[in-house]
């Protein structure tokens, strides 16, 4: 049911180890198989997203666990649902609050995790065929995309009882083996005060950025993968007035905006990659003018067409925040100018560029702002 290797076989010369010691009860597999049969019926009949199926499985636990096992196992009942859909490894790892991401690089290889304090660590859990098939099916159901040789990559979000998970998958011929990255998103958004307290942003910079967003300035947040771009954008978006109509365009739902605080939020989840998709991000960005937003959030602007459409939207009067990837300010400007050939007149519609970075400090990875660049009469200058 769960693929665990011996601790002595886990040791890796280059990475520290992260050991899961989970002794499952004797009747675990018997009961899991019963729930699994029910799950397969649900999946066939409902074609439902993972969140709906979980609701049903948790109900089954409450009705059947006490009867079948007389509640004598003394074990976390959630193990049964996760085991029933072959995602027990994911549950066990993300039960550890220090685990940020899970990496599965090759089938039947050890799962790697990103630890908040220790960085990358190798685990004693294997990326099994059962685990792969379950994640693949759930991701396809949730995204309405099918992984194939012509569409070998997929990115989606899964809503689960342990929080929202962002899943990124690649399959052959794009990769040598099925690979995936699963990132757990916070259940509640990190606000601007928390970012300042954790020294990810200085109080001065945070005040400046909040004033900028309230003035409907156009802001680009760019940085390395997992460097806190969306976290920062989320904290800033929480500061907008409740009477603003905010439109959010993402490839996988990541920003958390409570409806009681921001009742006029409209969210769209549009895949950034997917040749067979009828809905294109650049098309939806170009439609923003007809949706009457006061402000917009454009998540993960990755390619030339989406970037150009974003700039054209800003030049037409749309105001908002966009996130993209770069290692530094110069690299971002070079890509816009040289690779994407974006005219300077369009780039000038950007008021502020924030560069985020992962920094190793006192053996702990810190995600924060590396630099802020403000557009003025003489071009961009670092704040």
Image (spheres, rainbow, N blue to C red):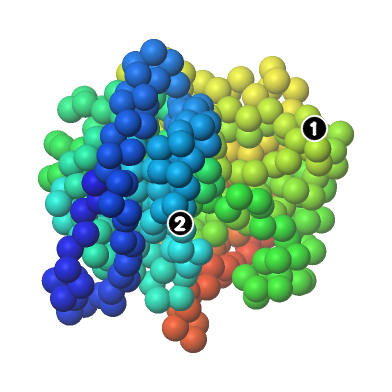
Left or right: 273 with respect to 178? right
Q: Could you say which disc has been placed on residue 74 in the image?
A: 2
Which residue is rendered at x = 46% and y = 36% of the image? Answer: 67
Q: Residues within 10 Å of mark 1 (few under 14, many from 20)?
A: some
Asked if marks 1 and 2 touch (Cβ < 8 Å), the reply is: no
Q: Quadrant of residue 373?
A: bottom right
- Numbered mark located on residue 357 in the image: none
**Horizontal side of residue 83 vs 380, given as left or right:** left
Disc 1 marks which residue? 263
Position of residue 268 in the picture relative to residue 196 (left or right) = left
The answer, for residue 312, to whether it is visible in the render is: no
Which residue is located at x 69 percent, y 54 percent? 235
**Alpha-carbon distance for marks 1 and 2?**
43 Å
Q: Is residue 152 above or below residue 321?
A: above
Residue placed most toward the observer, 26 or 221? 26
Q: Circle 1 sits in a helix, a strand or a loop, which is it?
A: loop
Q: Residue furthest bottom?
A: 362
Q: Position of residue 109 (x, y in %)?
A: 16, 56
């Amino acid at each position: 049911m769960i693929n665990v290797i011996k601790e002595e076989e886990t040791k890796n010369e280059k990475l520290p180890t992260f050991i899961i010691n989970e002794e499952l009860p004797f009747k675990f597999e018997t009961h899991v198989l019963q729930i699994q049969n029910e799950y397969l019926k649900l999946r066939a009949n409902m074609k439902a997203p993972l969140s709906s199926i979980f609701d049903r499985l948790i109900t089954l636990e409450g009705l059947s666990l006490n009867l079948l096992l007389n509640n004598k196992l003394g074990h976390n009942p959630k193990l049964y649902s996760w085991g029933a859909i072959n995602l027990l490894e994911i549950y066990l790892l993300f039960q550890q609050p220090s685990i940020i991401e899970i990496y599965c690089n090759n089938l039947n290889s050890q799962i790697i995790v990103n630890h908040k304090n220790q960085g990358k660590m190798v685990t004693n859990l294997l990326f099994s065929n059962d685990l792969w098939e379950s994640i693949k099916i759930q991701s396809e159901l949730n995204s309405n995309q099918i992984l194939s040789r012509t569409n070998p990559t997929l990115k989606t979000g899964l809503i689960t009882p342990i929080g929202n998970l962002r899943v990124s998958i690649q399959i052959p011929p794009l990769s040598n083996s099925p690979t995936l990255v699963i990132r757990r998103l916070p259940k509640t958004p990190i606000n601007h005060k928390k970012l300042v307290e954790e020294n990810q942003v200085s109080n001065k910079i945070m005040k400046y950025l909040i004033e900028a967003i309230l003035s409907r300035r156009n802001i680009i947040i760019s940085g390395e993968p997992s460097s806190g771009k969306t976290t920062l954008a989320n904290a800033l978006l929480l500061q907008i007035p409740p009477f603003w109509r905010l439109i959010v365009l993402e490839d996988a739902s990541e920003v958390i905006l409570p409806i009681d605080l921001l009742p006029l939020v409209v969210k769209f989840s549009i895949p950034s990659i997917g040749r067979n998709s009828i809905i294109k991000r650049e098309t939806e960005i170009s439609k923003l003018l007809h949706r009457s937003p006061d402000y917009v959030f454009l998540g993960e602007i990755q390619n030339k067409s989406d970037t150009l459409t974003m700039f054209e939207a800003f030049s037409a009067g749309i105001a908002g925040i966009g996130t993209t990837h770069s290692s530094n300010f110069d690299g971002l400007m070079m890509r816009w100018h040289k690779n994407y050939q974006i005219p300077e007149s369009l780039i000038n519609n950007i008021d502020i560029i924030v560069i985020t970075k992962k920094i190793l400090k006192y053996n702990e990875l810190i995600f924060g702002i590396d630099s802020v660049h403000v557009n003025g009469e003489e071009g961009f200058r670092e704040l």
